[in-house]
Image (cartoon, grey):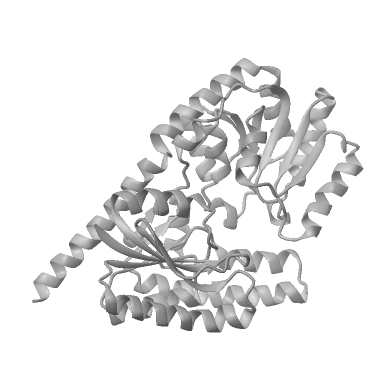
């Protein structure tokens, strides 16, 4: 069994499925021991520990000060990496969505002659720039400066010196290649699901006129289009309801949408649940007929691989989603929903079409569920990641022997 060091920004206990399912469950059981270097939840005071084929090394707490997170934590990481690598051999160091800690990981990989892998799940520098463009406040000016630093580290240090780069989608690969990143290094790995987990849900809806949105309510996503679309739906089906499940970047994001709901007079038809535990959110969605996945067309969001869409489909739900590189590909290949252009009328027509024909919606839900099992189950995705790592390890072994 191989040994991979994985340095991530997510907090323990892990919640993102590309960490908790792909690496923590599948890859650690089938392919490699994983040594995690990560922050701990502010309520968790546990020391470093081992559990099965996963080792956990904490470098900070989620509520640490900025000085602690950006200055002290990298030094803690450097120290703990050195101690570990003097004791045991590692076959690769992977850094996912980290910047200063990514530089430390790269440095240590060069010192110990270990392959360095970078994993980018979201265009974080570009999001920082977009926040400043959308609201030129002093706070967002600081965010923009952070984006400049992240951009320099990502494009000038981490990616040029990485032996392999995992990205979220084919579109992200194209975008990064246009910025000068070596396309031969990049492997797209889309978001997936654990189909075993989703098999517990009964896809038969009990509330046929309820629609669900699960995800961020960040104003950068322009969800006012979805609210406007649902006003048209309510005009057709007065008893219909839209559940907005999630929270915003800040409180103002949700207030903007709530004010729009009030102004349209559909406050009895739109429910803001706030952030729910994942299991509770999925239990709620399970009783509905239709789910929506609006992704605002922009450089930032076009390169993403939406988790919500494949989760809806894994539950057997018919989906209405707008044209977006990954979403369009998924819906065209799966026949699991309706793909529409970005706009209030277009979303409304898609939703109304499915609410009008529950049997059609349930057929689409069944199609989507079957497609996800064959294409986006994490057992399938893990085989791609393990194959790429195997190729990297074989190459390193060959090069080392050749040098001798």
Question: Which residue is at the front of the view, 183 or 35?
Answer: 35
Residue 168, visible in the rendered structure: no
- Residue shown at 55%/84% (left/top)? 71
Q: Position of residue 42 (x, y in %)?
A: 62, 67
Residue 123 placement: quadrant: bottom right
Q: Residue at x 56, y 25 (%)?
A: 202
Q: Is residue 316 placed above or below 113 in the rendered structure?
A: above
Image quadrant occupied by the C terminus = bottom left
Residue 304 placement (x, y as % from top left): 53, 52
Return the x and y of residue 319 as percentages of the image width and height. Answer: 60, 32
* Vertical comparison of 335 with 221: above or below: above
Q: Is residue 212 visible?
A: yes
Q: Is residue 324 left or right of residue 240?
A: left
In the rendered image, the quadrant that contains the N terminus is: bottom left
Depth check, front residue: 132 or 258? 258
- In the image, residue 366 above or below residue 45: above
- The image quarter containing residue 104 is bottom left
Q: Residue at x 71, y 55 (%)?
A: 218
Instruction: Answer with left or right where residue 326 lies relative to residue 181.
Output: right
Count the labels in the image. Answer: 0
Question: Relative to 81, is 220 on the left or the right?
Answer: right
Q: What residue appears at the point 35 percent right and 74 percent down from the top-left corner?
A: 161
């Amino acid at each position: 069994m191989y040994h991979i060091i994985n340095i991530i920004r997510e907090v323990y206990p892990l919640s993102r499925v590309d960490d908790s399912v792909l690496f923590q469950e599948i890859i650690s059981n089938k392919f490699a021991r994983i040594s995690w270097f990560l922050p701990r939840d502010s309520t968790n005071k546990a020391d470093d520990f081992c559990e099965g084929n996963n080792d956990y090394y904490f470098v900070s707490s989620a509520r640490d000060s900025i000085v602690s997170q950006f200055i002290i934590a990298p030094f803690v990481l450097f120290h703990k990496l050195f101690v570990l690598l003097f004791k045991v051999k590692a076959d690769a160091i992977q850094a996912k969505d980290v910047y200063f800690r990514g530089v430390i990981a790269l440095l240590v990989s060069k010192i110990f002659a270990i392959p360095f892998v970078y994993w980018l799940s979201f265009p974080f520098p570009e999001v920082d720039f977009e926040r400043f463009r959308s609201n030129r406040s002093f706070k967002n000016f600081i965010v923009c400066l952070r984006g400049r630093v992240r951009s320099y580290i990502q494009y000038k240090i981490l990616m040029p010196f990485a032996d392999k780069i995992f990205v979220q989608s084919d579109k992200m690969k194209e975008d990064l290649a246009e910025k000068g990143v070596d396309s031969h290094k990049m492997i797209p790995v889309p978001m997936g699901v654990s189909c075993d987990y989703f098999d517990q849900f009964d896809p038969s809806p009990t509330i046929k006129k309820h629609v669900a949105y699960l995800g961020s309510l960040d104003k950068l996503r322009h969800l006012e289009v979805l609210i406007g679309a649902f006003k048209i739906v309510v005009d057709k089906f007065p008893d219909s309801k839209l559940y907005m499940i999630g929270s915003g970047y800040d409180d103002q994001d949700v207030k903007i949408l709530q004010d729009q709901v009030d102004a349209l007079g559909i406050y009895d038809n739109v429910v803001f649940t706030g952030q729910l535990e994942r299991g509770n959110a999925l239990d709620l969605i399970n009783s509905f007929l239709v789910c929506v996945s609006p992704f605002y067309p922009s450089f930032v969001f076009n390169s993403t691989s939406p988790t919500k869409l494949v989760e809806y489909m894994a539950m057997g739900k018919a989906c209405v989603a707008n044209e977006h590189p990954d979403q369009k590909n998924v819906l065209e290949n799966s026949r699991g929903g309706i793909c529409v252009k970005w706009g209030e009328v277009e979303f409304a027509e898609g939703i109304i079409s499915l609410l009008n024909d529950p049997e059609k919606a349930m057929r689409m839900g069944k199609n989507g569920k079957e497609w996800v099992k064959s294409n986006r189950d994490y057992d399938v995705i893990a085989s791609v990641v393990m194959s790429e790592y195997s190729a990297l390890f074989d190459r390193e072994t060959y090069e080392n022997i050749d040098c001798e």
